[in-house]
Every structure is written in C-alpha cells, then in structure tokens.
Amino acid sequence: MYVVIGATGNTGRVVTEDLLAAGLPVRVVGRSAERLADFVKSGAEAAVGDVADAEFVAQACDGVGGVYHMIPPRYDVDLSAWQSEAGKALFEGIRDAGVPYIVNLSSVGAQHHHGTGPIAGLREQEDRFNELTEADVLHLRPGYFMENLFMMLDAIRGMGVLPMPLPGDLAVAMIATRDIGAVAARRLAALDFDGHHTMELLGPRDYTMNEVASLVGAAIGVPDLPFVTVSEEDAAAGFEQMGVHPATIATFMEMYRAIADGRVAPQETRSAANTTPTTMEEFAAVLAAAYGA
Ligand SMILES: NC(=O)c1ccc[n+]([C@@H]2O[C@H](COP(=O)([O-])OP(=O)(O)OC[C@H]3O[C@@H](n4cnc5c(N)ncnc54)[C@H](OP(=O)(O)O)[C@@H]3O)[C@@H](O)[C@H]2O)c1
C-alpha cells in the first residue's frame, strides 16, 4: 500500500493516477472526502484529515510500504511557520508509522539552508527525513513550476504584460507538475532507491522570462506579450491583492532575490535523467484554455 499526501493537488493527483494505473494499492490523503471520491471510485482508499495532526498522519500511514510526501502550501498564513508546523507533524507521523520508503517533494535550491524563502522550509523537511536511518528517502528537487503562471493570468489580462520581480534574460529551469508526479510514481512503484538521495528535475530546458512571455503570449492570443521586471514593492502589492499573508510575501521576495542572484540554481548538470518532457509550448496551450483564448 502506498500513501499519497496532497492527492488532489498538482503532483499528488498524477502520483495517485499513475500508481492506480499500475495496479498498485493507494491510500489518498486530503481534507475532503468529496474531493477524494473519484480516486475511491477508481479503487483507492481515502484518509481524510489534516496533515498538521501527527496522529492522523501516523494512522493514515500505518502499515504502508511507501509514501509520497509534500508539505501542502498555505499562503493565507505565515508560510514559513506553517511549513514548520505541518512539516514536523508529517515527519512525526511518517516516522511513527515506520514507513520504509519516502519520496519527498523538495525544490531546486534546497542545497541552501537559508536565504531562499519557502525553499529553506523544504530543506528543513529534507533534514528531518534524513534523520530516519531506517528509511530509504528520495528528495525530488524540481525547478520552478510552470503552474505558477496560472497566478499571472489576471495580471496579463489587466496590464497586457507578464510582470515579475526577475530579470527578463534570466534563464530558469521550469517544469510542469505532471512530470514531477510521473517521476515520483515511477520511483515509488520501482522502490529503486536505497539510503538518502536527492534528484533534481529540471523541465525540458531552461527558459528566459522573455521567452516565457513570448510563448505564453502566442498561445493566449496576445502576440509579443512583453515581460516586465517589476519592483519588489509592486510585486508585493500584487500578492497583497491576492490575500497573501505579509510574512509570506516577504518570504516570496527572498526567493525571487535568490532566483535572480543565482542562489537557487540547479546543482546537477542537465542529463536525460533530470530532463522532463513537457515543454513551455505545450504548457502554454493549457494556460490558453484557462485564459479563455
Ligand atoms: N511552486 C513552485 O514553483 C514549487 C517549486 C518546487 C517545490 N514546490 C513545493 O511543491 C509543493 C506543492 O505541490 P503541489 O503543487 O503538488 O501541491 P498543491 O497542488 O498545492 O496541492 C496541495 C494538496 O494538499 C492538500 N492539503 C492542503 N492542505 C492540507 C492539510 N492541512 N491537510 C491535508 N491535506 C491538505 C490539498 O488537498 P485538499 O484541498 O483536497 O485537502 C491539495 O491536494 C509545496 O510544498 C511547494 O513548496 C513548489
């Protein structure tokens, strides 16, 4: 039996679908039985509860052979404090259940303990799992999610530009979350890791922000959509409008600074193993559907 934390999310959904498609038994974790119902129809068991409750996590993971773990993000509270609270509870629950194989969703940039915003919280979780000498642990370190661009669609619609506090000519490893889920499911099905490892996942290639704007613009019917580097103040104001907690906005700004100054750069040389298939061109078509183009 495998447990998937965050099974209704971007990556967890794919992990669940792929494990079920391989005929493997899955217990899906989330806060709503209704949202998990389709997986139950497809043969999964559901465990409904809050990952900040270590006892619930231990029960959900009782007797299982492997877990897909991620810290669900929360932007309406202080994200770092939440990462710490939920991260500890998830760690304690998984440890107490004695799960032998853990695939943990971390991030590019997790080589650093500090100065990377939310990525530092993911590194802290890697460190917790690395205490488990009895468990085999694979930390996946993907690049910047292409899905983050969904948050920019309103700004594109309103301002006619793609605005971010990053340089336009900065090349960034960007990945579609379905590709992360596919790797996680493959490694969990194979249980082919031994000890504690990290694995970066870098998308099909690096894209500059200027290229992203041009590819997204072409797909949504705004040709020559310009990328605009905005100030931290303007970016923060945009997040404030979306209801993001002030401490979380501050940690996002730290992350953008770390991306811009190269601190959040991949450590691995690009290879067949860390290159994933979905291109920005393909993903732009998904964005276009959401944009209504
Ligand atoms: N964005 C990036 O560029 C990036 C890059 C690298 C790493 N990451 C990391 O990736 C992770 C997010 O992955 P994702 O996009 O696959 O997640 P996601 O789509 O945000 O999904 C989170 C899932 O967790 C569940 N959930 C939320 N709060 C919960 C709670 N308190 N108890 C139980 N379940 C809860 C939600 O399901 P219900 O609502 O149904 O409960 C949802 O299915 C984060 O840890 C983030 O730091 C992000």
Image (cartoon, rainbow, N blue to C red):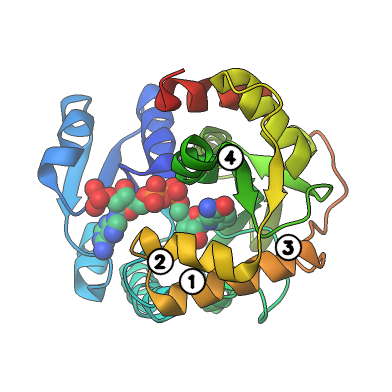
First in sequence: mark 2 vs mark 1 = 2
> Label 3 sits on what residue type?
Ile
Image spot of residue 30 (x, y percent): 23, 51
First in sequence: mark 4 vs mark 1 = 4
First in sequence: mark 4 vs mark 3 = 4
**Quick one: quadrant of the N terminus?**
top left
**Which residue occupies 72% across, 69% down?**
258
Q: Distance between the residues labelled 2 and 1?
A: 8 Å
Marks 2 and 4: which is nearer the front?
Answer: 2
> Label 1 sits on what residue type?
Ile
Residues at discs 4 and 3 in contact (Cβ within 8 Å)? no
Q: How far apart are marks 4 and 3 (CA)?
A: 15 Å
Give residue 249's mark. 1
Image spot of residue 275 (x, y percent): 75, 36
The local secondary structure at tag 2 comes to helix
Under 8 Å from ligand 1: the CB of mark 1? no
Q: Where, by quadrant of the figure, is residue 192 drawn? A: top right
Q: How far apart are marks 4 and 1 (CA)?
A: 20 Å
First in sequence: mark 3 vs mark 2 = 2
- Residue placed under numbered mark 2 in the picture: 240
The local secondary structure at tag 3 comes to helix
Under 8 Å from ligand 1: the CB of mark 4? no
The local secondary structure at tag 1 comes to helix
Q: How far apart are marks 3 and 2 (CA)?
A: 21 Å
- Residue placed under numbered mark 4 in the picture: 146
> Label 2 sits on what residue type?
Glu
Q: Where, by quadrant of the figure, is residue 28 drawn? A: top left
Frontmost residue, 125 versus 73: 73
Q: Dot 1, crowdedness within 10 Å: few (<14), some or many (≥20)?
A: many
Give residue 259's mark. 3
Q: Where, by quadrant of the figure, is residue 138 drawn? A: bottom right
